[in-house]
Image: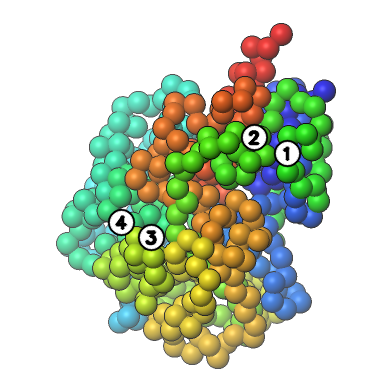
């Protein structure tokens, strides 16, 4: 009998498997798709030689992840590539604010009225960043805080809505960039803890940047898989699990799935009936004949580019998709241009480019024209560079990854109390009412992102349970 079976070979499932295998437990992973990766895959979606990331592409939380940093993933081919600028936020007048590795450079891009406010916001936390991130990503506490004082100070700043935090800024440049940071978790700007979300992304950039993985996000998943196999674990792809009886006997079953799928497979009925799924994404992967012709020079060298004219436009786009049930007229876009720093992703002289906007959960429309109108506002002539595009709305995203219910790439609404207490109000979010069944997906804390910490935290709950057994 195996000690643990993992269902789903996304970053969290693979991380949970590695953490258990490192501690001497026998582990096997079962994945429904023909490749591992979940939200961290790389495929030729458009034309031969153009390697795209169907979901996550830039990884500020990946390079900062306490779980990943404790593993020798570089030995298994994972290499982080840092673009000249982690992120840029262009404006219609051709200028841009930036999120740089340098706090001073970032603050200067906001202008003199907000430079000091930004420095006072981030500089107290940077010297204690590693302990703060570990404590933040262990909430609700799966272990005692390493630095409770810094965590408490962070809570005072981060628990209120981001709209409160942004009162520190007098001009729109800082407000717009910070609003965009919050929007990465597809949360309305006035939700609780959204100030903390934006602050974490900013601190992550200053600490270690917003890199891409050489060759694509698949290399993260492949490195985790290779490490797991060296530890004695096994991985089985093309293996769809519809019920627990489909799996070999084990002392524990750990699900890197949505709560809905877990309840269906494990026979838990309506255990997660109150779990809410959030707004969906409409994503386009582009093969380009040249770099994106951004008007703002800073955007041309940034790995990630946020596209939204101001904080009001960004907030309206999030509100439309999350609360009004309609696609925004001017969608806020998160875009990534990996080939700025990784030429292996496209043929010589060509580029890959990745963009998505927010739409209602389960939306079946086409946002292509609205997305490209937004891009043309900040990069005139963009359409002339397009060689091919691959579009994916909520139905296609859900077909690609069953965890993206209704196109929700966060595997559950990251708003309200559910941003902190997911998948339900509990001090033990990784356990279920079935003593041998656990949940490790991004539906559990600390939530969405390719960082493996949900899997890491869930593995702690599993090994504590297994060690109590005779």
Judged by depth in the image, the label closer to the viewer, 4 or 2, is 2
- At 51% from the left and 85% from the top, the residue drawn is 382
Judged by depth in the image, the label closer to the viewer, 3 or 4, is 3
* Residue 126, numbered circle: none
Measured Cα–Cα span from mark 3 to mark 1: 32 Å
Nearer to the camera, 400 or 298? 400
Crowding at dot 1, Cα within 10 Å, few <14 / some 14-19 / many 20+, comes out as some
| Residue 39 in view of the camera | yes
Question: Callout 3: helix, strand or loop?
Answer: helix
Which of pointers 3 and 1 lies earlier in the amino acid sequence?
Answer: 1
Which of pointers 4 and 2 lies earlier in the amino acid sequence?
Answer: 4
Give the residue pinned by disc 2. 267
Measured Cα–Cα span from mark 4 to mark 1: 39 Å
Measured as percent of width and height from the top left, residue 143 is found at 48, 23
Question: Callout 4: helix, strand or loop?
Answer: loop
Q: Are marks 2 and 1 in contact (CB under 8 Å)?
A: yes
Measured as percent of width and height from the top left, residue 19 is found at 66, 31
Nearer to the camera, 23 or 69? 23
Q: Are marks 3 and 1 in contact (CB under 8 Å)?
A: no
Measured Cα–Cα span from mark 3 to mark 2: 30 Å
The quarter holding residue 39 reads: bottom right
Give the residue pinned by disc 4. 189
* Residue 322, numbered circle: 3
Question: Callout 2: helix, strand or loop?
Answer: loop
- At 56% from the left and 69% from the top, the residue drawn is 393
Measured Cα–Cα span from mark 2 to mark 1: 8 Å
Tell me the quadrant of the picture where the C terminus can be found: top right
Crowding at dot 4, Cα within 10 Å, few <14 / some 14-19 / many 20+, comes out as many
| Residue 26 in view of the camera | no
Measured Cα–Cα span from mark 3 to mark 4: 11 Å
* Residue 243, numbered circle: 1
- At 46% from the left and 43% from the top, the residue drawn is 275
């Amino acid at each position: 009998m195996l000690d643990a079976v993992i269902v789903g070979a996304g970053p969290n499932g693979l991380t949970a498997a590695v953490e258990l295998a490192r501690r001497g437990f026998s582990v096997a992973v079962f994945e429904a798709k023909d490749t591992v990766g979940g939200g961290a895959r790389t495929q030729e979606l458009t034309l031969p030689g153009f390697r795209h990331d169907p979901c996550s592409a830039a990884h500020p939380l990946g390079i900062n992840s306490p779980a990943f940093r404790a593993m020798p993933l570089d030995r298994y081919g994972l290499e982080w590539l840092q673009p000249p600028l982690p992120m840029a936020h262009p404006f219609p007048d051709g200028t841009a604010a930036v999120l740089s590795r340098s706090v001073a450079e970032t603050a200067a891009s906001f202008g003199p009225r907000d430079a000091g406010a930004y420095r006072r916001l981030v500089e107290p936390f940077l010297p204690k960043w590693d302990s703060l991130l570990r404590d933040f990503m262990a909430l609700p506490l799966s272990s005692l805080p390493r630095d409770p004082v810094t965590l408490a100070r962070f809570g005072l700043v981060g628990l209120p809505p981001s709209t409160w935090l942004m009162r520190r800024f007098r001009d729109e440049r800082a407000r717009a960039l910070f609003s965009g940071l919050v929007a990465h978790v597809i949360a309305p700007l006035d939700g609780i803890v959204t100030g903390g979300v934006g602050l974490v992304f900013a601190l992550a950039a200053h600490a270690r940047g917003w890199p891409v993985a050489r060759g694509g996000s698949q290399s993260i998943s492949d490195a985790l898989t290779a490490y797991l196999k060296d530890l004695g674990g096994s991985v089985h792809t093309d293996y769809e699990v519809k019920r627990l009886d489909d799996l070999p006997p084990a002392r524990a079953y750990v699900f890197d799935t949505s709560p809905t799928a877990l309840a269906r497979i494990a026979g838990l009925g309506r255990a997660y009936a109150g779990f809410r799924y959030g707004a969906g994404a409409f994503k386009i992967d582009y093969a380009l004949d040249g770099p994106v012709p951004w008007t703002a020079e800073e955007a041309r060298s940034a790995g990630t580019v946020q596209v939204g004219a101001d904080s009001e436009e960004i907030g309206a786009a999030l509100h439309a998709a999350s609360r009004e049930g309609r696609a925004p007229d001017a969608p806020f876009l998160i875009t990534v241009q990996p080939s700025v720093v990784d030429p292996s992703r496209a043929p010589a002289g060509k580029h890959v480019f990745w963009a998505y906007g927010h739409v209602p959960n389960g939306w079946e429309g086409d946002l292509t024209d609205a997305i490209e109108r937004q891009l043309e506002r900040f990069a005139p002539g963009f359409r002339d560079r397009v060689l091919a595009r691959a579009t994916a709305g909520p139905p296609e995203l859900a077909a690609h990854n069953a965890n993206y219910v209704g196109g929700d790439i966060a595997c559950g609404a990251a708003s309200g109390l559910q941003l902190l207490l997911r998948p339900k109000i509990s001090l033990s979010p990784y356990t279920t009412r079935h003593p041998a069944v656990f949940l490790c997906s991004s539906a559990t804390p600390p939530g969405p992102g390719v960082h493996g910490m949900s899997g890491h935290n869930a593995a702690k709950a599993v090994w504590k349970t297994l060690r109590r057994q005779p």
